[in-house]
Image (cartoon, coloured by chain):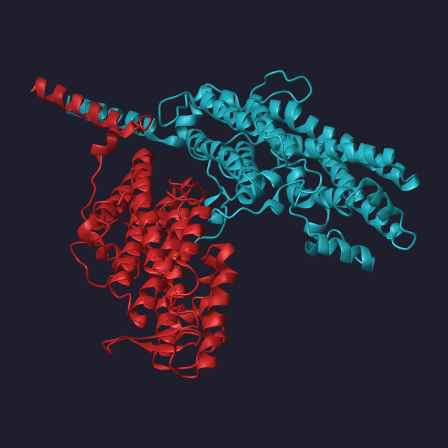
């Protein structure tokens, strides 16, 4: 009898411990993480890479046409191909895993603000290696933004910039080299995906380095650091780190004025990726939202976490849609509108970076700056 | 016996349920954890903050030699600011390579502080120990002969702009805008590093480190530094000592107990109260400027203090005034403290009093 009592006690204790353990807690949840990873791999990431590659190809073709025939028409085609590729990037940058991470996509093609001084120097010297660290802010989409929109005040003058009898060829060469670098990046990603897919879907845990952990970390990094901070928070002065000082020249797409389109696309993409939406058909596949639902994750106010995340992002989008002018203009005149966007985006952060990661038992492995 | 066993089982079940209940972080468990009476927690470390307070101390000591007519070396101040070239007497600070005041200053202000240092040194060179007056940099003695301050040609005391200015653009900014903001608060709170705590705990401790008070403040008010002195200085009217300390203690306990809602409430309290201290301190100095209006040394000195405490108001994410409004206030304060009028001082004071709701106590600060 005594030993029976004792073993009963142990049993109760054991039950309690198991239930309390966050690691095993998520294991018991009825969610097929492999199926989730397969959906992300085949219906989200791969088609996103393919889309980026095909847009980059279009950009490359348009660059060749522009090279052969400098005209307003070829310039405008080139610009629209640039925009299409840049928009495609906004989706792909959310799934920065495997080959996308290996090529360091974000830093390789979208460091802004671009450094026009370095670009001008590179063009003048004809002596540059685009892969060099010193050139990260002199290439990619922001560099093209400068070359195609910021090198002169009118379309005619921009055509004259590239048609200059002395320097025109150097400028066209730089343009081609930057585009070539983007396209080469896309080719590496396409070629690398096949091998990586099996690694990705086979790594079904939630520990550091697992596919879920990578996805969740990169998703957070892109949303928190590259969208909330870089696209909105720093240029508007909304991020406390700026002390409220705005810096309009730091927006994405400063010269083309595409900042709003690019940022809205990025937030939309964040919703699509969160839902595991099929890239090509918009069919709703197994995504982070389904995982959270399976975990019965709630916000601190006991609201369904998936719903709260999507709703909060929709609110950010609503604020963004109210803004017509390029963000650089808004930041320099009535920054308040952008700060409102920033605040809506900021409200997403505790949901995805604390509540979501805690429900999934995933550790955030990046820091937004140094501490001590 | 049977009943007793059942009771024991029921008790166990309760304990088990309570322990497992982390689906309910809505603040109800606020009563379920202990909130200590002092900042006494496991794994607390903010040595980096203490070192920065030490750095500003040394920089201030050096700058104050100008009050006795010394000519200052701009490079020495810049080196102390950036912690370069073994600028400090305290070798420990020199060897704390990664710690510096400059890289923790609001980025947009770094150039401003450097220009203050350069201008200050230049003014001491021009003056070369001479007496100051409107249009002439130099040392000015108070009417009672007790105090000496070095002012530039416009009556600006750079020491205050730099020392008190960095209290705002570095310590206060880091405390309320960096460590208590999303970048440092939406972080891991699971993995405990020995001596340091979780990332979230650590960041909270770092914010506390910039307050400059002992862990048993306010029952102990020895060794108050920088903000600690001014918090205590306004305590009789604002009661900020307990408000701030309780919020820091409660927030830290809440983090260790995963009660983020309570944490967020404390962040709000800290931001509001700290801001009030800065605004009230500015008003305090404006009052003194009025009461010593005819004393060049005292008036210029306290107006320079006021300038810095107003400037600091920019660096709170939930500030009551916009940066444009704060700049407008500073413009009202003007750029020459020798030629300022009582009306100018009262205009500035009135704006601050209204913004912070200090109507009833405005003349007592």
Indicate the colour of chain A. Answer: cyan
Nearest the viewer among A218 and B211 is B211
Residue B267 is situated, as x and y percent measured from the top left of the image, at 33, 41
Indicate the colour of chain B. Answer: red
Quadrant (top left/top right/bottom left/bottom right) for the N terminus of chain A:
top left
Nearest the viewer among B10 and B332 is B332
One can see residue B196 in this view: no
Nearest the viewer among A355 and B216 is B216
One can see residue B165 in this view: yes
Q: Is residue A351 above or below residue B78?
A: above
The residue under the point 45% across, 72% down is B120
Q: Quadrant of residue A199?
A: top right
User: In the image, is A200 to the left or to the right of B90?
Assistant: right
The residue under the point 72% across, 41% down is A141
The residue under the point 50% across, 39% down is A208
User: In the image, is B238 to the left or to the right of B93?
Assistant: left
Nearest the viewer among B224 and B198 is B224
Residue A138 is situated, as x and y percent measured from the top left of the image, at 72, 50
Residue B38 is situated, as x and y percent measured from the top left of the image, at 20, 50
User: In the image, is B21 to the left or to the right of B331?
Assistant: left
Q: Is residue A75 above or below residue A129?
A: above
User: In the image, is B80 to the left or to the right of B291?
Assistant: right
Q: Is residue B283 above or below residue A302?
A: below
């Amino acid at each position: 009898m005594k030993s029976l009592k004792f073993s009963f006690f142990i049993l109760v204790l054991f039950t309690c411990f198991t239930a309390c353990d966050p690691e095993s807690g998520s294991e018991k949840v009825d969610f097929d993480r492999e199926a989730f990873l397969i959906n992300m791999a085949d219906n989200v990431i791969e088609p996103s890479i393919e889309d980026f590659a095909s847009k980059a190809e279009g950009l490359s073709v348009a660059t060749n046409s522009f090279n052969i025939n400098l005209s307003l028409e070829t310039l405008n085609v080139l610009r629209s191909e640039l925009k299409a590729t840049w928009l495609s990037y906004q989706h792909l940058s959310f799934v920065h895993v495997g080959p996308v991470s290996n090529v360091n996509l974000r830093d390789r093609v979208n460091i802004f603000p671009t450094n026009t001084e370095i670009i001008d120097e590179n063009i003048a010297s004809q002596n540059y290696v685009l892969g060099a660290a010193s050139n990260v802010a002199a290439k990619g989409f922001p560099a093209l933004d400068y070359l195609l929109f910021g090198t002169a005040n009118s379309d005619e003058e921009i055509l004259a910039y590239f048609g200059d009898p002395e320097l025109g060829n150097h400028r066209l060469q730089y343009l081609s080299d930057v585009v070539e670098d983007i396209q080469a990046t896309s080719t590496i990603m396409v070629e690398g995906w096949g091998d990586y897919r099996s690694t990705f879907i086979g790594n079904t845990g939630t520990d550091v380095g697992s596919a879920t952990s990578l996805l969740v970390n990169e998703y957070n990094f892109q949303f928190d650091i590259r969208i909330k901070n870089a696209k909105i928070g720093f240029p508007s002065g909304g991020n406390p780190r700026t002390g409220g000082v705005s810096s309009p020249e730091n927006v994405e797409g400063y010269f083309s004025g595409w900042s709003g389109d690019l940022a809205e696309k990025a937030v939309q993409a964040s919703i699509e990726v969160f839902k595991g939406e099929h890239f090509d058909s918009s069919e709703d596949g197994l995504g982070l939202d389904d995982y959270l639902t399976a975990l019965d994750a709630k916000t601190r106010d006991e609201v369904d976490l998936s719903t709260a995340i999507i709703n909060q992002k929709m609110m950010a989008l609503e604020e963004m849609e109210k803004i017509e002018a390029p963000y650089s203009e808004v930041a320099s005149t009535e920054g308040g509108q952008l700060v409102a966007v920033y605040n809506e985006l900021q409200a997403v952060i505790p949901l995805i970076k604390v509540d979501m990661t805690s429900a999934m038992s995933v550790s955030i492995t990046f820091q937004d700056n140094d501490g001590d | 016996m049977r009943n007793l066993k059942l009771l024991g089982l029921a008790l166990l079940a309760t304990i088990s349920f309570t322990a497992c209940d982390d689906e309910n972080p809505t603040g109800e468990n606020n009563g379920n954890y202990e909130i200590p009476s002092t900042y006494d927690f496991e794994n607390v470390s903010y040595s980096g903050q203490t070192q920065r307070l030490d750095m500003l101390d040394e920089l201030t000591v050096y700058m104050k030699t100008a009050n006795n007519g010394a000519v200052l070396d701009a490079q020495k101040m810049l080196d102390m600011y950036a912690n370069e070239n073994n600028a400090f007497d305290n070798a420990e600070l020199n060897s704390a390579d990664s710690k510096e005041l400059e890289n923790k200053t609001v980025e947009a202000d770094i150039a401003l502080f450097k220009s203050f240092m350069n201008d200050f040194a230049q003014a001491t060179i021009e003056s070369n120990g001479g007496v100051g007056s409107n249009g002439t940099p130099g040392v000015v003695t108070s009417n009672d002969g007790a105090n000496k301050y070095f002012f530039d040609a416009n009556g600006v005391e750079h020491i205050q702009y730099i020392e008190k200015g960095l209290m705002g653009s570095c310590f206060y900014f880091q405390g309320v805008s960096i460590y208590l903001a999303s970048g440092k608060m939406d972080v891991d709170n699971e993995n405990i590093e020995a001596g340091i705590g979780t990332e979230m705990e650590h960041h909270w401790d770092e914010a506390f480190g910039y307050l400059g008070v002992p862990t048993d403040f306010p029952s102990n008010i020895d060794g108050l530094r920088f903000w600690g002195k001014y918090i205590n200085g306004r305590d009789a009217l604002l009661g900020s000592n307990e408000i701030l300390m309780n919020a820091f203690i409660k927030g830290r306990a809440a983090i260790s107990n995963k009660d983020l809602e309570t944490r967020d409430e404390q962040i709000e309290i800290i931001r509001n109260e700290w801001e009030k201290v800065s605004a009230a301190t500015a008003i305090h100095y404006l009052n003194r400027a009025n009461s010593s209006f005819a004393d060049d040394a005292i008036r210029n000195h306290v107006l320079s203090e006021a300038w810095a405490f107003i400037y600091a108001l920019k660096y709170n994410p939930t500030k009551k005034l916009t940066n444009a409004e704060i700049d407008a206030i500073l413009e009202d304060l003007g750029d020459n403290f020798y030629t300022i009028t009582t009306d100018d001082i009262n205009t500035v004071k009135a704006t601050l009093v209204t913004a912070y709701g200090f109507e009833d106590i405005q003349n007592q600060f």
